[in-house]
Image: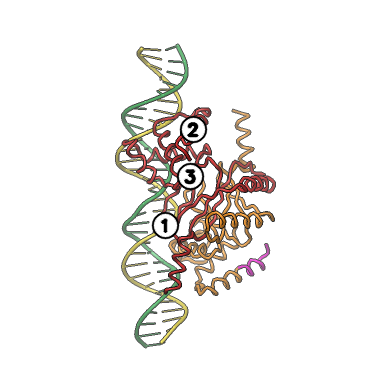
Chain colours: A red, B orange, C green, D yellow
Amino acid sequence: MTEESAAQTLAAVIAKLKSRNIRITPQREVILNYLITHHNHPDVETIYQGIADQLPNLSVATVYNTLKLFIDNDIIIELPSTDKDGSLHYDFFGVPHFHAICENCGKITDVFADEYSAINKQVAQLTRQQTNYQVTNSHLEVYGLCPECRQKLNLQKGTG
Amino acid sequence: MTEESAAQTLAAVIAKLKSRNIRITPQREVILNYLITHHNHPDVETIYQGIADQLPNLSVATVYNTLKLFIDNDIIIELPSTDKDGSLHYDFFGVPHFHAICENCGKITDVFADEYSAINKQVAQLTRQQTNYQVTNSHLEVYGLCPECRQKLNLQKGTG
DNA sequence: AGTTTGTTTAGAATCATTCTAGTCTTTTTG
DNA sequence: CAAAAAGACTAGAATGATTCTAAACAAACT
């Protein structure tokens, strides 16, 4: 992704928020920009550290408040905490995708697939039919072993 | 589900655990039985209260340890905490299904659908192809408004 | 019987998240 | 523009779910 398109994405999301009468404060813009340009599924602490130079007086509470605001407006999603830490992770959700999570090291990997949009539609429809929920979005997490951990564990098994 | 089949399910899961050389303690059996016979997506506190009469000396730490054991052996799954509380929820995962979660009241509803098994297979395959993960399972959560909250919120809107 | 390994208990410790009170900023209104 | 109102931010305290620790207990192994 080029810098130009990140800027375009930022502008588009800001427009979306403004259209809902949500104020764009410097804090919100910096946090949003961080999320658009970093795809490492950061937790609150990582975000806080990552923008400390741009917002020296930032409060962690503001990060929490802002993330909640973004979640409620379907701009980012929350990912479960892995075994390795106890904190939730966040992910800008511009292009729909799902997540592969390593049960060994806790790494989270984005999975983009054309088929996902059709799957999503089917799941929303099934849910409506069977529960009468009004569906707004969905999250899919796939659990398993990442290639690195697979290799590591196989070597251990071979050696031990 | 009849009582008989719950007992059969319990026996089957115990056999599975034993085949992996995992000890079946009274605590583990009671907690497992609770999860098999209650499908209200309990949190730790609810489980603890629900079996207090059967295990008067039970420690919460044991509940946490046992749930982790069951998760690692793909017997139960963990569900995210809703806005209404800060604790994780647990669900016996004998028959694969996914979850609809109400964004307003936090209710979690099981969704059973024949199509889910095919979706799951497709998702596992996509993940393998694109990330080279070795997939063991997956969770799907659908977010939206439950029928009750939809009605409640519509009435408010109409009245206000 | 004694030793090792694994499990449970009770309570303390941790730490992510939420809450609170006060301050600051922006918007609205006259 | 000034005043008032609404919304947002900060710093630090409070909460509370989860994890950790040390000691007691139970089961498996020699």
The chain ID associated with circle 3 is: A
Looking at the rendering, the stretch of residues picked out in magenta corresponds to B1-9
Where B18 falls versus B140 (above or below)?
below
- Nearer the observer: mark 2 or 3; the answer is 2
Q: Residue C8 falls in which quadrant of the image? A: bottom left
The chain ID associated with circle 1 is: A
Q: Is residue D5 left or right of residue A141?
A: left
- Nearer the observer: mark 2 or 1; the answer is 2
Task: Name the residue tied to disc 1.
Answer: A84
- Mark 1 and mark 3 lie on one chain; the one further toward the N terminus is 1
Residue at 32%, 38% in the rendered image: A53
Q: Is residue B62 magenta?
A: no
C-alpha distance separating marks 2 and 3: 18 Å
C-alpha distance separating marks 1 and 3: 18 Å
Q: Is residue B7 magenta?
A: yes
- Residue A67 point in image, percent of width and height: 45, 40
Where B9 falls versus B86 (above or below)?
below
Q: Which mark is residue A8?
A: 2
Q: Is residue D6 left or right of residue A115?
A: left
- For label 1, the SS is loop
- For label 2, the SS is helix
Q: Residue B128 falls in which quadrant of the image? A: bottom right
The quadrant of the image that shows the C terminus of chain B is top right
Task: Name the residue tied to disc 3.
Answer: A91
Give the residue type at disc 3: Asp
- For label 3, the SS is strand
C-alpha distance separating marks 2 and 1: 35 Å
Give the residue type at disc 1: Lys
- Residue B141 point in image, percent of width and height: 57, 49
